[in-house]
Every structure is written in structure tokens, then in C-alpha cells.
Amino acid sequence: MESRMRTLKEYQYRESGLGNVYLQHIATYQCECGEKLVQIPAIDRLHDAIAYQLLKKPSLLTGPEFRFLRKWVGLTASQLAALLGVKTRISVSRWENGKASPYCLH
């Protein structure tokens, strides 16, 4: 099977879970069967750079940003809940989905 390569000027990196991450000059491949593959080089370094930008931002984290950082450090919601001393992973899930705020721990 043959595939076609195409370079996108800008690619919204939705797989990060963040709606505001765009990558430039990303190679994509499309198989004859229609399946598409996006090639993101040095993805670990990319995730480190995203995390760095999130950690230094002056405003509070959004739910998706909070989730990205939790996954970046390799914690499950249950593990993070235990480390923070909250009752269950449901609290963490609510923070990540914007249904509660982690900044008001009650």
C-alpha cells in the first residue's frame, strides 16, 4: 500500500487535550484506504515544553491544563487524589472537567 505525504502549515494538536496547542509544519500521511497518520517529532520534548509553559503561566490552570499536567507527571486521578489528600478520584475528575475548582479544597 502506498501513502501520500503532506506538510501542514498549522496543525491543532487536539491529542494533547488542550484546545489551544498548534504545531507548525507537521507531516501527515494518508493511506490509500483513507486512514491518516500525523507525524509529531520529539513528542516527549513537545510535552515538556507544553508543561513548562503551563507551569509558568500567571493565571490559574484550566481543567484541561490540570489534566495535561497530571498525565505528564504520570499520575492517575486516584494517585493524585491520594497525594493531595482528597477523598476520591471523582474530585480530580470534577476539577479536570470544570465541575469543581481545585483551588477551593473543602
Image (tube, rainbow, N blue to C red):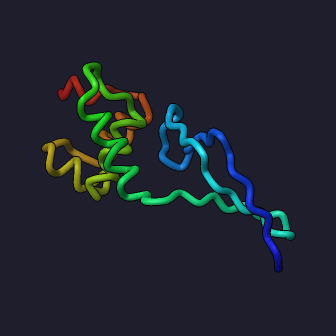
Q: State left or right for residue 58 relative to residue 44.
A: left
Q: State left or right for residue 7 relative to residue 101.
A: right
Instruction: Name the spot of residue 72 as percent of width and height, x first.
Output: 32, 52
Instruction: Name the spot of residue 35 as percent of width and height, x first.
Output: 77, 64
Closer to the camera in the image, 19 or 27: 27
Q: Is residue 89 above or below residue 2?
A: above
Q: Is residue 6 above or below residue 10?
A: below
Residue name at image x 13 percent, y 44 percent: 85
Residue name at image x 34 percent, y 52 percent: 71
Residue found at the far top of this picture: 59
Residue name at image x 54 percent, y 49 percent: 15
Residue found at the far right of this picture: 32
Closer to the camera in the image, 104 or 2: 2
Instruction: Name the spot of residue 9 as percent of width and height, x first.
Output: 65, 40
Q: Quadrant of the N terminus?
A: bottom right
Instruction: Name the spot of residue 94 as percent of width and height, x first.
Output: 38, 36
Residue name at image x 72 percent, y 62 percent: 29
